[in-house]
Amino acid sequence: MTPLKQLERLYIEQHSGDCVNVPRELVERLLEIRRDRQASVRMYLKERRMLTPTELTLFSALLKTPGHPVSKRDLLTVTGAASIESLWVHVNRMRDKINPQVAEVHAVTRFGYMVELRG
């Protein structure tokens, strides 16, 4: 689970009986974390493209081990995707946003996916 999701879940668990009114500071911090994560992968994206939070989490997980496959099960856990089919949709949408001259996401038959970094 990503730090962002952990922080969000912890806050909701602590305030589960309350009408959840998220403090402005927390919202600003969560947005700052998201912007930092987007900036860290921007060099891999096509011009003027942004990844959704799920795509960003997925791509970050693949970037941790470039050239090595990551299992579908691990990717489902990390992204919180509901099924293999929804994971497939996220991967395909993410592929459309990634600059193929910099990185490419490959399917590894019966296992998962891997990212290949280029020049």
Image: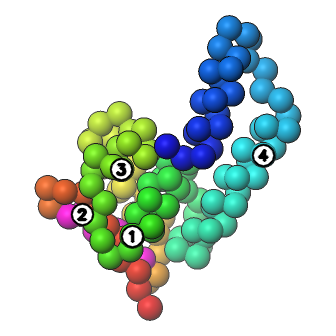
Left/right placement of residue 20 relative to residue 81 reads right
Residue type indicated by callout 4: Arg
Residue 21's quadrant in the figure? top right
Residue 108 rendering spot, x and y as whole percentages = 20, 64
Foreground of the two, 109 or 2: 2
Q: Which residues are magenta?
A: 103-108
Residue matched to label 2: 107
Q: What residue occupies the far top of the structure in this picture?
A: 17
The kind of secondary structure element at disc 3 is: helix
The x, y position of residue 40, in whole percent, is 62, 68
Closer to the chain start, of discs 1 and 4, is 4
Q: In the displayed image of the protein, which residue is found farthest to the right?
A: 24
Q: Is residue 10 magenta?
A: no
Q: Please tell me how crowded label 1 is: few (under 14), some (14-19), or many (20+) other residues with Cα within 10 Å.
A: few
Label 3 Cα neighbours within 10 Å, binned few <14 / some 14-19 / many ≥20? many
The residue under label 4 is 29
Q: Amino acid at mark 3?
A: Leu
Please give the label number shown on residue 75. Answer: 3
Mark before the other along the chain sequence, 1 or 2: 1
Would you place residue 47 above or below residue 54 in this image? below
Dot 2, crowdedness within 10 Å: few (<14), some or many (≥20)? some
Task: Nearest to the eye among marks 4 and 2: give it.
Answer: 4
Mark 4: give few (<14), some (14-19) or many (20+) Cα within 10 Å.
Answer: few
| SS class, disc 2 | strand
**Quarter of image, res 16:** top right
- Give the alpha-carbon distance from disc 2 to disc 3, as whole Å: 12 Å
Q: Which residue is mark 1?
A: 65
The answer for how far apart the CA atoms under marks 1 and 2 are is 14 Å
Q: CA distance from mark 3 to mark 1?
A: 13 Å
Q: Would residue 101 be found to the left or right of residue 56 on screen? A: left
Q: Secondary structure at mark 4?
A: helix
